[in-house]
Image (cartoon, rainbow, N blue to C red):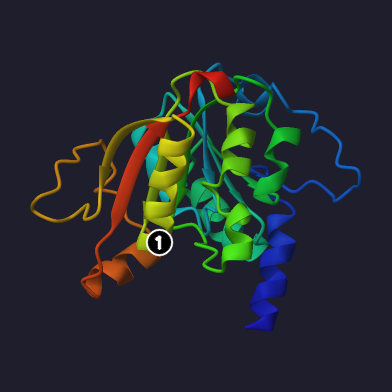
């Protein structure tokens, strides 16, 4: 196992679709900030992010189904990114990239109005109250998103964690963001969510939760225009 891990770390260093900035403090702005579409992908398509992408299942499937959009999966775990990046190269997907950074650093990598959507698929719920500010739907993170999103760009959340889901609904209400759709049971008969690919794409962990008959929560919202 350790040998495989080392091999993957060596391989990922040579992958052209993986960006691994060296840690520097204070953190400098990355040279592709504001230039991802043309500078990395060589096109003018919209850029969509998946934060905490893990092995990149969602990023990959979104890219397969949306060739006129660019997708960047973001995660700090290199071994996870290796799988998604390798699959993207094997399939020749030109509209996929992976960025190995902590989510807190996104404002050093993307310019105002550069991002056209954000997916949060089964993020760490950070259940302990002192760590709520680290939740990817906390006001602090939404403020970061507001600095890089175009107006009316959607933010999607899929989670099995009810506490995180209700926390996010509360944050949306308190900060006057616009909730577009939400359901406590995405795959239940009462669910009226027909968003393209929301049900069709399932992560590794999502399939496990579904096998255990756990409900999957989903919501989509746009930020209060005053934040952008």
In the displayed orientation, state which residue is furthest to the front: 174
Does the rendering let one see residue 151? yes
Vertical relation: 32 (above or below) 103? above
Q: In this view, does 202 lie to the left or right of 168?
A: left
In the displayed orientation, state which residue is furthest to the left: 189
Please tell me whether mark 1 sits on a helix, a strand or a loop. Answer: helix
Vertical relation: 211 (above or below) 143? below
Residue drawn at point x = 57 percent, y = 64 percent: 129
Q: Is residue 26 left or right of residue 215?
A: right
Residue drawn at point x = 32 percent, y = 56 percent: 202
**Image location of residue 109, percent across then percent down:** 72, 34
Query: Quadrant location of residue 78?
Result: bottom right
Q: Quadrant of the N terminus?
A: bottom right
Q: Mark 1 points at which residue?
A: 163
Does the rendering let one see residue 60? no
Task: Judge by depth and name the residue closer to the eye, 131 or 23.
Answer: 131
**Image location of residue 189, percent across then percent down:** 8, 53
Residue drawn at point x = 56 percent, y = 37 percent: 142
Q: Quadrant of the C terminus?
A: top right
Q: Residues within 10 Å of mark 1 (few under 14, many from 20)?
A: few
Q: In this view, does 26 lie to the left or right of 193?
A: right
Task: Judge by depth and name the residue closer to the eye, 200 or 120.
Answer: 120
Vertical relation: 23 (above or below) 227? below
């Amino acid at each position: 196992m350790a040998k495989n891990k080392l091999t993957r770390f060596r391989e990922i260093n040579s992958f052209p679709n993986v960006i691994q900035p060296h840690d520097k403090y204070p953190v400098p702005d990355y040279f592709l900030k504001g230039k991802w579409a043309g500078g990395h992908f060589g096109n003018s398509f919209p850029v969509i992010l998946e934060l905490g992408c893990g092995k990149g299942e969602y990023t990959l499937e979104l890219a397969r189904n949306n060739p006129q959009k660019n997708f960047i999966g973001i995660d700090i775990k290199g071994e996870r990114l290796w799988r998604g990046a390798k699959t993207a190269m094997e399939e020749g997907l030109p509209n996929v990239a992976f960025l190995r950074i902590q989510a807190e650093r996104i404002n050093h990598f993307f310019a105002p109005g550069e991002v056209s959507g954000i997916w949060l698929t089964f993020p760490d719920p950070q259940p302990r109250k002192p760590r709520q500010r680290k939740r990817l739907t906390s006001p602090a993170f939404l403020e970061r998103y507001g600095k890089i999103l175009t107006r009316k760009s959607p933010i999607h959340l899929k989670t099995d964690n009810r506490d995180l889901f209700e926390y996010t609904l509360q944050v949306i209400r308190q900060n006057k963001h616009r909730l577009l759709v939400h359901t406590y049971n995405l795959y239940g008969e009462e669910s009226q969510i027909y968003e393209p690919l929301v049900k069709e794409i399932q992560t590794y962990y999502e399939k496990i939760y579904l096998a255990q008959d756990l409900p999957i929560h989903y919501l989509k919202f746009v930020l209060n225009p005053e934040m952008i």
